[in-house]
Image: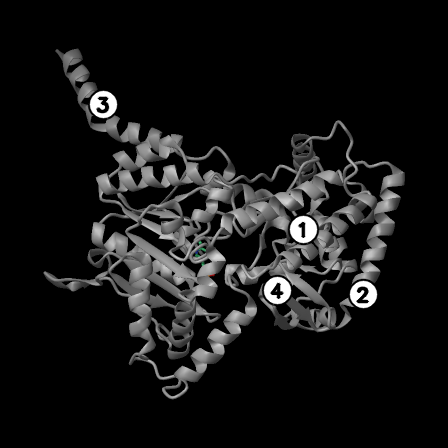
Amino acid sequence: MQQMALLIGIVAAAALFLPAVRMRLELSKAKHPSLTGHARMARRVAGLVPYYAYDEERFFRSDAAPAEVAARRRSGFARLAELYRQRFARSAALTAETESALSDLQFTGRYRVPFQYSRFLRQHIKAGAFLQSSEGVTVTDLDGNRFYDLAGSYGVNVFGNDFYKTCIAEGSARAAELGPVLGGYHPAVAYNLRRLREISGLDEVSFHMSGTEAVMQAVRLARFHTRRTHLVRFCGAYHGWWEGVQPGIGNPVTQRETYTLKDMDEDSLRVLRRRRDIACVLVNPLQALHPNAGAPSDGSLVDSARSAHFDREAYATWLRRLREVCTQRGIVLIFDEVFVGFRLAPGGAQEYFGVRADMVTYGKTLGGGFPVGVVCGRANLMKRFREDRPADICFARGTFNSHPYVMAAMQVFLERLGTPAIRGLYEGLDELWNGRAQQLNARLEEAALPVRVANLSSIWTVCYTRPSRYNWMLQYYLRAEGLALSWVGTGRLIFSLNYTDADFAAVCDRFVAAARAMERDGWWWSDPALSNRSIKRGILREMIAQRF
Ligand SMILES: Cc1ncc(COP(=O)(O)O)c(C=O)c1O
């Protein structure tokens, strides 16, 4: 009798808990096996990594290169250091003067290359962080050096810096009469609303000061209206630096209401189909270039394992499947187009991939050169109150939302977006940029250089074909050739669409020259036994030795 009761108890408990256990297992299965897919563990591991820096000997021979190769590296390095000293003197001096009080500069300066190499490199190669002017597709530093701009202002620069100067000047002139008055709206708001509704195909719009804020608001609204707690983001995707969308390294607080799932994977769809606590799914279409990997940066370029490949059809299919499951389950599908919006197509990623979201966030370029974040969404998701519960609201305000100057510059941006000159830039856009990537790759291959580029339209990343610990050096050779990169180095090159064939040919020449110089100076020497895996193992051994 007692046994029977026990058995019934076990069966009852199993019936009660099995679905929960199964869902937990499904969730685990939908996590990417890398540390990027395990936010909490990644943070713990990051906390264990000890600091150590290579001395001069190790800096040049961390891959146990023969003495002759190390000597070539040394003399190449010395030449580069001297060139930087002479050519970038004023920019470097102001950088040195400001660095100790400018936290952002300290951070970016330190993480341009893997930390083991950073100290020695910064002692000898001083790249300035200041710029004086911009024109066409170039920027000029304080010493008068002109660079082709491959940094693209973090993606803001879609149509060329001169375009944004016009948006700012014209916009400022239109806003001048009202000036900095906040609270009441400048009439530009009405025009922007109309155009953004047309472009997004959505009903309502809210204006914010940054992309981070826009994403924050979209997620908050999704939670408010679905009355569910969790947001889903995909492994590696960046959505700004706000807590909930950055659950791992970089955020000191553990995020309990964020699921990070595998991108482009059936297991993730299963989780979306089954769980009842998911309010929204956030998609950054830029991930199509490197699904499940974080934004590539030379700061973590310890080997040649970085890879990227864009398959438009495969990603469009994935978005269609996401759309389907979100519709079935009442989950809010949010496209975060802060980066790619207006770069891939005039109607953004929705148009480019042929899939509609429930909410879309925009930012960067849309401000016409000013800071901005925008949420567009279906009317039932954008309301910040409930008709039947007056005290139950979803609060979102912000002093500078709808700033007259930003709104007026945005109006100029949107007006110009509709002109034949700008519309023309989108014609054959993919063919043009794919062709240019192929052109550069052909030249690199011809010169037997171990470098290739991969691209999502005008957003490029550099990959390396030969196992090496020194790929991050390329950014310094590129700068010496007059190519300006952002602090993530060769991880991301961003072209503005006003690059002519002649401009691009000049970039190609300089890129190949830089890679040739790097090859000549021995940085890409590689022992045939060296592999990306053996490099990683070697670094792990160093870290362990450092800790014990
Ligand atoms: C996709 C995406 N979302 C959000 C953001 C955050 O925008 P902001 O830097 O304006 O806060 C970024 C910035 O790079 C982004 O690329």
Amino acid type, residue under disc 1 in the picture: Val
Label located before the other in sequence (1 or 3): 3
Q: Is residue 461 left or right of residue 72?
A: left
Nearer to us: label 2 or label 3: 2
Nearer to us: label 1 or label 4: 4
Tell me how far mark 4 sits from mark 2, CA to CA: 25 Å
**Residue at coordinates 54% horizontally, 41% vertically from top-left?**
45
Q: Nearer the viewer, residue 161 or 73?
A: 161
Nearer to us: label 3 or label 4: 4
Secondary structure of the residue carrying tag 1 is loop
Amino acid type, residue under disc 4 in the picture: Val
Label 4 beta carbon within 8 A of ligand 1? no
Q: Nearer the viewer, residue 301 or 392?
A: 301
Which disc number belongs to residue 360? none
Can residue 267 be spotted in the picture?
Answer: yes
Assign ligand 1 to one image quadrant: bottom left
Residue labelled with disc 4: 137
Amino acid type, residue under disc 2 in the picture: Arg
Which disc number belongs to residue 14? 3
Label located before the other in sequence (2 or 1): 2
Tell me how far mark 3 sits from mark 4, CA to CA: 65 Å
Label located before the other in sequence (3 or 4): 3
- Mark 1 packing: few (<14 Cα in 10 Å), some, or many (20+)? many
Residue labelled with disc 1: 113
